[in-house]
Amino acid sequence: MNDLSQEYKFYIALVAGVIIATLLSGSPAGYLNFLLLFLVFGIMMITRTWHDRMFYLTCGSQPLVIACSVMNIWAGLFTVCMLAGMMCGELGLLESHRDFRFFALFCGSSFLIALLIQLSNHVLLPLLIFSCMAAIILGIQTVRMHQFRKHYSGA
Amino acid sequence: MLLRRCTQGLSLISLLLISCAVILDDMAILLAGCTLIMGILGQYLIFDHHFREIIASVEIQRSLDRNPVRKGTELQVSTNITFQGSPGMHVQIADLLPANTILLEGMTSVTTKPDPSSQAHQWSYRIIPIIHGTHHFSGISVTIRNLFFEENVQLTREGDRKPALSVLPTGSFASMASELSDGTKDSRKVSVWTGSDVHSLREYSAGDDLKHVDWKVSAKYDKFFIRKFTGLVSHPPLVIVDLPWCDAPYPEKEFNRMISEVTGMAKHTIQTYQYVSILLISGPNIIHLIREEKNIARCISELREWMHPAERLVHFYHMADRSDLRSKVRLSEYVLQQTTDSRARVFFENLHDRYVSILQYQRVPAFSGQVARTLSQLVMTEAYLFSLGYGDTSHIPQVVRQLQSLQIRVHNRIIDGTRPEKSVFRDYSAKTSEARS
């Protein structure tokens, strides 16, 4: 019940944020955001008992992220953070201080990506930087995992 | 690292989004794609963190029911595993068997549900080593998965591979005592389990294995000589149980002790020799034969079914054994020759006549034939006879004599209530030989 309420809290914050952002921007396609909010809510309700609910929620919320980002990149960032909070709540990943730190780290990283996108004129540069960072992280992880396996294999 | 179905789907969507962003040069789609990939990366880092925590906390302790063991015999392994669980993480731990062993029965792995507390699991299984030598366990395989990822690691450190299983070859397992006492004897039959002793050499003939060439002797005589090896074969002892008569009172406490001793012996014999034969008799009646049973559980259930006081259709009524009677006749004849006292002579003459008349009318009992027929089906070098030694025990010398005529060493275990901690060894053959002398 606690997870569900956490999930709803984030959803309510998402709804409030999207409404405010849509009204402030005065976008003529603002109604689309409200429709997509309903879509997310519908998926939340339908998939309540499903095992892989998180997957459907993520897929169903991507149109909302894109719609908000088209309107304003920071609105898109806010949507991403709220949706991430919903997912974490669903997975039970917001229960300890360490979990909140991970969530905050995700939000901070998303902010940096949004900032990078905001400062760039084209897709390729931020994508290249992001790809390099991801490759470096994966490279470090591969080396760490190799050392870890080596240690536990008694070598 | 294995991506699970959910992560595969999310990765595909994020790649699609990034592809669309590149094609359309749309920053909004790029943000959606990049944050999705970052979410997956973040989940990977969280998974990796928990994975390391769990692996670092895994501790294993194995115990073997006996070590060393003989090649081809069953061995029970009990494993205790403790580890610190983690929320959202399914942990599967499998015990990796030593090389060249076969799993006979039991589970070697455990799968746990997500639980952040410290967990302890215990399981046991039976294995059969098929090659002799010292074998270490191969380690532990730990598989951890959550909704997004799955990872497997094999822990093969020295501590994870203990204890070392010492498997002795069949021949070397024989004890250093006399050949008959441990149920083994030298065999020169061709066997896959050859011992290490050479009993003879012969000239090489086509088709012989070159591994068996004695190079030293071959060099000396300038032609190939092949070593012929001896192999030790061992036969399990026959367990004979003399059940009490159900229509007469019997000491229940001693009977229960006899049941537990027989069960323990049957179990030990199966573990050591791979099978056991148990002959159940009640007085001069053969009740049941458990023949070459290999399964412990089946053997014990069969013992449970049959080991209770039984009806005796035939009774010996303390009938003297024919060999004993002949010895007594000889003894009385000897005394008659030696003595000059008239009263003693009359007594011994009467005694002699009585013995002779009994001998004339006494036939070989059917029980002896039944025992002989039963024993002819079995191969053994020694036998254990369990009895309460209560009431009429005249059938026991019949059994003992049959076994001894086949050169089988007999151990009589008489369960005596006066010595509760030990069963008494009673030598019927000694008694009969004393009487003869």
Image (cartoon, coloured by chain):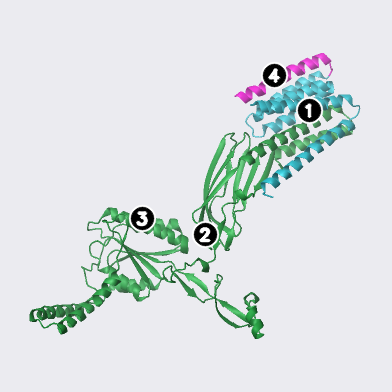
Chain identifier of the residue bearing label 4 in the image: A
> Which of marks 4 and 1 precedes in the sequence?
4
Whole-number angstrom distance, CA of label 2 to CA of label 4: 68 Å
Q: Secondary structure at mark 4?
A: helix
Q: Secondary structure at mark 3?
A: helix
Q: Position of residue A107 (x, y in %)?
A: 76, 25
- The residue at the far left in this view is B343
Give whichever of A107, A150 is nearer the camera. Answer: A150
Q: Nearer the viewer, mark 2 or mark 4?
A: 2
Drawing shade for chain B: green
Whole-number angstrom distance, CA of label 3 to CA of label 2: 25 Å
Give whichever of B163, B328 is nearer the camera. Answer: B163
Q: Quadrant of the C terminus of chain B?
A: bottom left
Q: Is residue B35 above or below residue B337?
A: above
The residue that label 3 is drawn on is B260
Residue B352 location, quadrant? bottom left
Q: Position of residue B333 (x, y in %)?
A: 18, 82
The chain that appears cyan in the image is: A
Q: Position of residue B258 (x, y in %)?
A: 33, 57
- A6 falls in the magenta region: yes
Amino acid at circle 1: Ser
Amino acid at circle 2: Pro
Is A37 positioned to the left or the right of B195 in the image?
right
Region of the chain picked out in magenta, as a range: A1-28
Chain identifier of the residue bearing label 2 in the image: B
Whole-number angstrom distance, CA of label 4 to CA of label 3: 72 Å
